[in-house]
Image: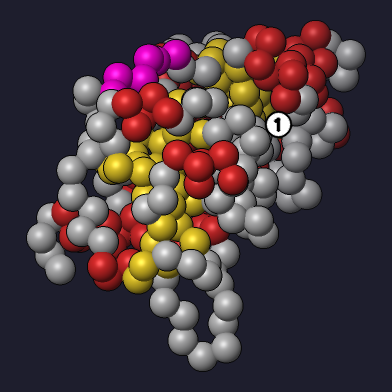
């Protein structure tokens, strides 16, 4: 059903604005995603978690057939374009924001053999791109350390192109639990360790991608000495975190499937 909001002081508008704050997202266990494509991905893969959708009047006019198809399933608020522009993050907004309840699931270490650990990833764009890579390369679950940017930042969801809704994501502060459950923690580095081609990536593994400038934290290096690096040619010193994650996860997947 469509519910029209006419005031920028409406509690729904205030709620959406506050969802841009990490503390508030954690408090109400919700997050928002902005954009038509990502919202459609949420409708396809996380429909049971959608709290409501808010759209501009212009968006409704342009996409009325689609909105009529889903109006009975979701609560949909409509607002004037000038009000919508006060709650959106992007400069050229498409006119749709979806509010989603965070899914709650328990990390079952008996279930997963191919993990990706993101350690202190600071850039939301990189985080989103890595989540997209994780889905594409067959990563079974992603573990986020405490020092990462918030995985529920709206830019992360946009850059993940919907992968945020389709892969298993867990926050974990103590990675020793992985060691105790038989995982081989493989740390990526730009300048030290053995060549990536020398690692067989078999068994229960957890690949670690570190901070964009500082790399993997000292704390993680204390619990694993298995370090790999991607060989660089020419004068390039390193790749960015998202590029490195793509190469490493795909190489590991191909090696696990005996393609190389």
Which residue: 58% across, 78% down?
A: 237
Q: Position of residue 130 (x, y in %)?
A: 48, 50
- Above or below, 219 against 130 in this view is above
Image position, residue 191 (x, y; %):
52, 70
Residue farthest to the left?
A: 258
Residue 159 seen:
no
**Quarter of the image with the C terminus in it:** bottom left
The quadrant in which residue 141 appears is: top left
Residue 53 part of the magenta segment: no
Describe residue 111's horizontal placement relative to residue 118 as left or right. Answer: left
- Magenta part of the chain: 104-109
Closer to us: 38 or 55: 38
Residue furthest toward the bottom?
234
| Magenta stretch, overall SS | loop
Provide residue 139's location: percent of width, then percent of height: 31, 43
Q: Is residue 68 left or right of residue 212?
A: left
Name the residue tied to disc 1. 56
| Residue at position x 57%, y 39% in the image | 219
Local SS, label 1: strand
């Amino acid at each position: 059903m469509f519910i029209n909001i006419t005031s920028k002081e409406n509690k729904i508008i205030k709620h959406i604005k506050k969802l841009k704050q990490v503390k508030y997202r954690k408090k109400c266990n919700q997050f928002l995603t902005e954009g038509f494509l990502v919202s459609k991905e949420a409708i396809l893969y996380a429909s049971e978690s959608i709290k409501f959708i808010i759209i501009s009047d212009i968006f409704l006019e342009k996409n009325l057939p689609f909105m009529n198809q889903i109006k009975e399933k979701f609560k949909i608020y409509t607002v004037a374009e000038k009000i919508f522009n006060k709650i959106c993050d992007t400069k050229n907004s498409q006119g749709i924001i979806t509010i989603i309840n965070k899914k709650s699931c328990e990390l079952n270490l008996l279930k997963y053999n191919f993990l990706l650990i993101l350690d202190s990833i600071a850039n939301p764009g990189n985080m989103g791109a890595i989540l997209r890579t994780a889905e594409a390369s067959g990563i079974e679950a992603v573990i986020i350390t405490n020092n990462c940017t918030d995985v529920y930042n709206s830019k992360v969801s946009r850059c993940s192109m919907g992968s945020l809704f389709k892969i298993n994501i867990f926050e974990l502060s103590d990675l020793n639990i992985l060691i105790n459950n038989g995982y081989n923690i493989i740390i990526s580095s730009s300048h030290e360790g053995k060549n990536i081609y020398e690692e067989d990536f078999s068994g229960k593994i957890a690949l670690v991608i570190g901070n964009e400038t500082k790399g993997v934290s000292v704390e993680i290096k204390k619990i694993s000495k298995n370090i790999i690096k991607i060989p660089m040619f020419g004068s390039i010193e390193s790749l960015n975190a998202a590029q490195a994650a793509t190469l490493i996860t795909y190489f590991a997947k191909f090696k696990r499937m005996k393609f190389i």
